[in-house]
Image (cartoon, rainbow, N blue to C red):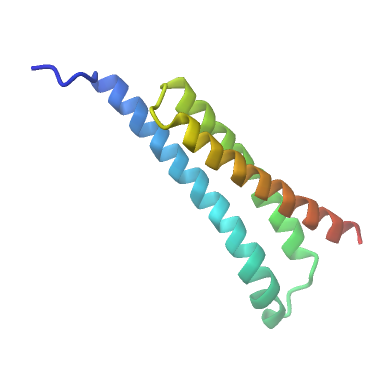
Amino acid sequence: MTSGTAPAETASRQAAERRFSQSMVVSGTRCLLAYVVFPYVFPLLGVTDVVGPAVGVAIGAVAVVFNVVSIRRFWRVNHRLKWALSAVNVAVIGLMCFLAAGDIAELAG
């Protein structure tokens, strides 16, 4: 009658998967802003160039935190895909750092 996985373990794995999804949404939002909203929409609205990079740095920092939390949660529950999903998270963190460096350089002038 046992399914092989305790309810608490299943809940922990589901929470880890939710955290991964959240980190990807935040990171995807940052990329949408960086590649669509900042370069095309903001100029149409007459918003200055300083707003985009400042918002980008803030959202990028939040995205990195979400990705780190996601990695930790997958390792804590010993998820079967922890290596693959950690690699995805690390790649996204690298992208966020690259974008933040560009934003900081733009803000510095």
Where residue 2 sits in the image (x, y, percent)? Answer: 13, 17
Between 85 and 68, the one lying in front of the other is 85
In this rendering, the answer to whether 57 lies above or below 47 is above
In this rendering, the answer to whether 69 lies above or below 78 is below
Where residue 48 sits in the image (x, y, percent)? Answer: 78, 72
Q: Residue furthest bottom?
A: 44
Question: Could you tell me which residue is drawn at 73 percent across and 74 percent down?
Answer: 47
Left of 12 or right of it: where is 38? right
Left of 82 or right of it: where is 3? left
Where is the N terminus found, in terms of image quarters? top left
Question: Could you tell me which residue is drawn at 55 percent across and 37 percent down?
Answer: 87
Q: Quadrant of residue 62?
A: top right
Between 37 and 47, the one lying in front of the other is 37
Left of 51 or right of it: where is 63? left
Between 95 and 9, the one lying in front of the other is 95
Question: Could you tell me which residue is drawn at 61 percent across and 59 percent down?
Answer: 31
Where is the C terminus found, in terms of image quarters? bottom right
Between 77 and 29, the one lying in front of the other is 77
Where residue 106 sits in the image (x, y, percent)? Answer: 84, 61
Does residue 49 appear anywhere in the picture? yes
Where residue 53 sits in the image (x, y, percent)? Answer: 76, 60
Left of 67 or right of it: where is 98? right
Question: Could you tell me which residue is drawn at 79 percent across and 51 percent down?
Answer: 101
Q: Quadrant of residue 28?
A: bottom right
